[in-house]
Amino acid sequence: MATAKNQKKWRRKNHLVKSQLNVVARRSVHEELEQLAESFQLRGKGEAVTFSAFVTRALIQRADYNTEAARMLDDFAAAYHRDRDLYQN
C-alpha cells in the first residue's frame, strides 16, 4: 500500500487524466487479470483492465460492420448475464 504522501502526489499529478479504481473481485478475476498481463506482456493487473476495456471497445466497433463479430459480442454478453453470479462478489 502506498503511503498517504505518495497517494496525494499521484492524485495531484494525474487528476486530469486518471482516477484510481479500487474494486473488490473474486480471486478468479484477479488470477485472470494476472494471466492476461502475462499473456499480452502487460505491466500488471491494472493494465490488464485497461487492455480488456480496449478489446471490448474494439469488438463493439467491429460489430458495427461485421455480423460475425456482432454475433460473438451478443453471445459473450448473453453468457455473462446468464452466469454473472460466478463473476461478481
Image (spheres, grey):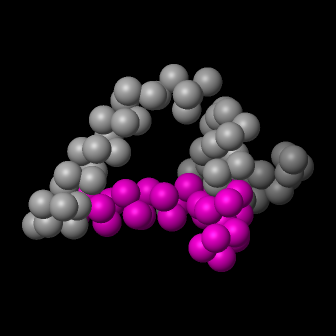
Which residue is located at x 64 percent, y 54 percent?
33
Q: Which residue range is magenta in the image? A: 34-61
Q: Quadrant of the C terminus?
A: top right
Q: Is residue 70 visible?
A: yes
The prevailing secondary structure element of the residues shown in magenta is helix
Residue 57's spot in the image, x, y percent? 33, 60
Q: How many marks do you count on the picture?
A: 0
- Left or right: 38 as drawn, with respect to 85: right
Answer whether residue 54 is magenta in the image: yes
Front residue of 22/40: it is: 40
Answer whether residue 85 is magenta in the image: no
Which residue is located at x 31 percent, y 66 percent?
58
Which residue is located at x 69 percent, y 46 percent?
30
Which residue is located at x 67 percent, y 33 percent?
26
Residue 44's spot in the image, x, y percent? 71, 63
Q: Is residue 16 visible?
A: no
- Left or right: 39 as drawn, with respect to 63: right
- Left or right: 87 as drawn, with respect to 66: right
